[in-house]
Amino acid sequence: MSDRLWIKQPLACFDGTEQIETNGIVIEGGKIVEVLAAEQLPSRPYDTIFDARQHVVLPGLINTHHHFYQTLTRAWGPVINQPLFPWLKTLYPVWAKLTPQALRLGSEVALAELLLSGCTTTSDHHYLFPVGMEEAIDIQVAAVNHLGMRATLSRGSMSLGEKSGGLPPEHTVQAAEVILQDSQRLIERYHDMQDGAMINIALAPCSPFSVTPEIMKQSAKLAEEKNVRLHTHLAETLDEEAFCLKLFGLRTVDYLDSVGWLSHRTWLAHGIHFNDEEIYRLGKEGVAISHCPVSNMRLASGICRTQELLQAGATISLGVDGSASNDASNMMYEARQALYLQRLRYGTQTITPELVLGWATRGGAKTLGREDIGEIKVGKQADLALFTLEDIRFSGSHDPLAALLLCGAERADRVMIAGNWRVIEGVIVDLDLPRLLNHHRKAAKHLINL
């Protein structure tokens, strides 16, 4: 990491905001130390050169919503044609049988798939803690470290079972004191507030239909005390809106406000069904939204109103969501679908490849509360995704940056995290992927058949 590397003369380069003309990027000590002008040479001697003339260079992509364990239940027959609430109620009993080994395998497959797509930082929202799974987040930390990625791991929770009017079965919920004690333990053990952090912790009660207002309030209080972020699902479907009105007498944003979550500390998954007044309030408080287009289309949930949210002051990022509602963990695929879904609402001139790639990079960093990633700028972490245009799908393309989305790039040629190459020629360094997939497939079949 102390060596100076010149990534020389990229075919195209996107800095997180726009396409730039550059003679390359100089990396030293895990950070970007120079972004060269078109004809500029490095200011000091360099140790190695990487010839990037065949590569489109992006900041490492940032995924802001996921459920790693759901890689074990992709394309499962009983839920293929169900909307959100029946989909959840059918899957909860299967997920409740999750084991530590299955979670480790599911997490590593999700992370590997993300990494191969050019993702360098991810979040995960894990809210299942059946008996034997008390250290689920610790398992995820180990998986993230094994892949050499960055992650914000959200300590999720479910405390409102069926007997109390919630959606989850009783054996999947936890008591408030257990949730809060473990949340504090995880923050104190893993949360790193420094630039270049590999692991952050967030607090993430699952959704209005699966947690009590009390656990929402206590989580907000703990998050402020420990300076961590808050995450939950909100306004994903009209069923959820009806649930909030029935159980709490409030619409979703009013409910969020009532439990102390209408804050710059908060980011929300989906954020589809907001009215104009609610969008104004979310933007005013600086709330961020993780737009999950593939999941939203798969479950027919609706289309996020990204432009109104942005104009109000909210932040937009992209999330692949769980691999049982996507059913993939691929950030380039997600970005392409975001481009097309949002064009249906706002038109071709408003929703550009640069805008959407900005959501997948700079927007993701802001959503996770990070200023050290998401851009190709001096002083930022050296997290980069490099793509070639040699596959048949790119033949005849002319704009290299636009081609990544329009022609459907799905796999990076190289990925760098903190100055270290984690993917080289489409292969993850130090990972036996065939062996991992063999074990993962067996675990997936076993979980369904238990």
Image (cartoon, grey):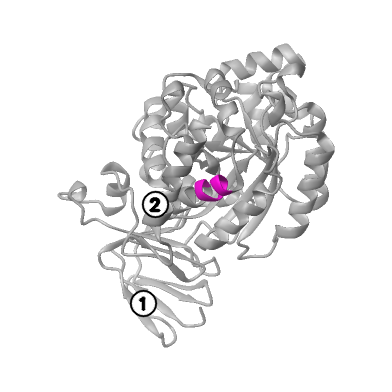
Query: Given contact means CB atoms under 8 Å apart, are the residues at marks 2 and 1 in contact?
Result: no
Viewer-closest of 11 and 448: 448
At 50% across and 41% down in the image, what residue appears? 319
Which residues fall within the magenta stretch? 101-106
Which label is found at residue 40? 1
Who is closer to the viewer here, 365 or 199?
199
Q: Is residue 103 magenta?
A: yes
Provide the major secondary structure of the magenta segment: helix
In the image, taking residue 294 as reference, residue 88 lies left or right, namely right
Q: Earlier in the sequence, mark 2 or mark 1?
A: 1
How far apart marks 2 and 1 lie (CA) works out to: 30 Å
Q: Secondary structure at mark 2?
A: loop
Which amino acid is tagged 1?
Gln
* Residue 10 in sight from this viewpoint: yes
Q: Depth-wise, is mark 2 or mark 1 nearer the camera?
A: 2
**Tag 2: Cα neighbours inside 10 Å, few (<14), some, or many (≥20)?**
many
As displayed, is residue 396 above or below residue 149? above
Question: In the rendered structure, does residue 83 fall within the stretch colored magenta?
Answer: no
Relative image position of residue 358 (x, y in whole percent): 46, 48
- Which image quadrant is residue 49 in? bottom left
Between residue 160 and residue 396, name the one nearer to us: 160
Which percent across, then down, holds residue 423? Answer: 39, 63
Residue in the image at 17% along x and 49% along y: 392
